[in-house]
Amino acid sequence: MKQAFLFTVIMAAVVFPSFLSGQVVDTTVCGILASPQSFDGKLVRVKGTVIAGFEEFSIKDAGCNQAVNAIWLAYPAGTKGKAGPVAFLRLQLGKNHPASTAEVRRTPVTLERNDDFKKFDALLSTPAKVSGMCLGCVKYFVTATLVGRLDGAQETGLARDSAGAVSGIGGFGNLNRYRARLVLESVSDVAADEIDYAKGGAAAPDAASTGGAFVPGAPSADQVKRGADAFGAPGEDNGVSVAFGGANEVPANDGAKSSANSPDGLVFDAVFDGERLKGPEMQVALSHIGTHIADIRSSNSAIQNLGLYGAEFRAWQTSLLGAVGAKAKTLTAPGGYVVYSHSWADSELGRNANAAISGFLATWAGISNPPKP
């Protein structure tokens, strides 16, 4: 496992140069997600619900009818804000990968660090007081009006050739699976909504919890070990880099290849917030992110090509097993979704866990389970 102290993260690989327009375009989350590339490089103003959590930092709208109903949010480099995801995985092509990448030229954004921004950042980084294990749980989500540079992508995640080898990377945010990213310039109209963790989270929409491209099965007993093993042995250079810090800023090498090599030409930059993930929570977070790495490198094409919903579902199943192994009484996801409780009967565990994970993904994170074709 190669160590590197990376304190910024976001973007994916091949993008076209774009330049910031001085005129602010008023739009909506759904308007952007309907055609992200048409807004690429533009200064936009958008109002919506903003969340920060375990792997989430986005402005979302549940009614957009997209696989991901959210725009990834990023601070300009050097902001040193507190809000953002507590665990994050960015994918890059390794230096030794044969594919070429286009030069990325994006107009820098200067953040207005006024009282509205300070309130916004503080609210989204206030931890919730929850009994048991709670991964990245914050006390509030906010509604706000955001102005910033919109970066749009045509493709997200990994592109593979006919042999299954990775040929390119696109997209933004965690796992490079967001089609749009908003780099924040200013924030206003900030209003806080306190999350009621006692309610156990809202149910998933019917479309998200029934019939879909991914149908969860029972997690395998070795998933926690498999996730941990994905980081490699100490001193092993397997293309996985681990850093401890924030993951809420645009990186200096935005859109470029990694400076590191990798056995398969694919580099995984994992970032964990050591201030907000302590002890067993950090171990569970490591196995969660490790599951993503192991799945992407799996020889099973059905697993390596899972959409974001399926990939996250499998990783949350690993987190559940990790919480059980740590003897946690409960495992809660941001938004109040109880993924595991020691009080559940064995006959209830699978049903309750699946309902909580699907509710969390669809309702909190804005990730849909697309229907089978």
Image (cartoon, rainbow, N blue to C red):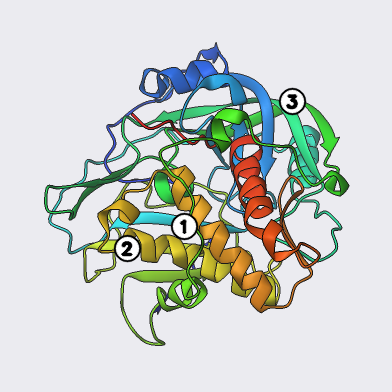
- 194, 62: nearer the viewer: 62
Horizontal and vertical percent for residue 91?
Answer: 36, 55
- The one nearer the camera, 227 or 49, is 227
> Which of labels 2 and 3 is toward the front?
2
Q: Mark number for residue 89?
A: 1
Query: Residue drawn 48% across and 55% down?
Result: 217
Q: Looking at this view, name the residue that lies furthest to the front.
A: 347
- Please tell me which of labels 3 and 1 falls first in the chain: 1
Q: Residue at x 35, y 39 (%)?
A: 156
Q: Badge 2: how crowded within 10 Å, few (<14), some, or many (20+)?
A: many
Q: Are marks 3 and 1 in contact (CB under 8 Å)?
A: no
**Secondary element at image label 3:** strand
Q: Quadrant of the N terminus?
A: bottom left
Give the position of the C terminus as an image quadrant: top left
Residue 267's disc is 2
- Residue type indicated by callout 3: Ser
Residue drawn where x is 54% and y is 43% of the image: 76
Residue 344, position as x, y percentages in the image: 77, 62
Which of the two marks, 3 or 1, is nearer to us in this view? Answer: 1
Which residue corresponds to mark 3?
188
Residue type, numbered disc 1: Leu
Mark 2–mark 1 CB contact (< 8 Å)? no
Q: Image check: 220 left or right of 303?
A: right
